[in-house]
Image (spheres, rainbow, N blue to C red):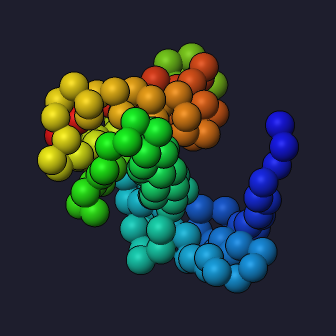
Amino acid sequence: MSILYTTSATATGGRDGRANSEDGRLAVSLSTPKELGGNGADGTNPEQLFAAGYSACFLGAMKYVASQKKIKLSEDTAVTATVGIGPRADGKGFGLDVALTASLPGVDATQAREIVDGAHIVCPYSEATRSNLSVRISIK
């Protein structure tokens, strides 16, 4: 694979700390949600960051697939990633649950399905999770 872009981020303090990208463009406070035993402070959490990254990446992949098919997507096209966390069935740690919901206004159902299915092949987040995480995809 030929790497086109590389970045890094550093977290300190774990789920109740901070995370910063190497270039300073991302600087967030982290806090553990009450549902995971935290105080629910104002910071974000890894699941929210994963949901934001996956939804943005998947939308980019949809735009790419649509452009290859010469289909114009509305500026209102959106992807919502819902990420859950909980104990794994094997009792050895935690796992993620992911659902993606794509909204493609003005695109007929058949074309929308082709774009979403193609995006699931193209998107690097989908590729990274393909063998170890079930991702449910729906079209709104």
Q: Is residue 80 visible?
A: no
* Residue 18 pos. (x, y %): 64, 74
Q: Quadrant of the N terminus?
A: top right
Residue closest to the eye, 120 or 90: 120
* Residue 25 pos. (x, y %): 64, 80
> Quadrant of residue 139 in the image?
top left
Residue closest to the eye, 5 or 95: 5
| 78 sits left or right of 10 in the view | left
> Quadrant of residue 111 in the image?
top left
Residue at left offset 55%, top offset 34%: 122
Q: Is residue 112 visible?
A: yes
| 2 sits left or right of 10 in the view | right
Q: Is residue 132 above or below residue 52?
A: above
Residue at left offset 78%, top offset 54%: 4
Residue at left offset 28%, top offset 63%: 75
Q: Is residue 72 above or below residue 118?
A: below
How many numbered circles does the render carry? Answer: 0
Residue at left offset 47%, top offset 68%: 44
Residue closest to the eye, 54 or 4: 4
* Residue 80 pos. (x, y %): 32, 50
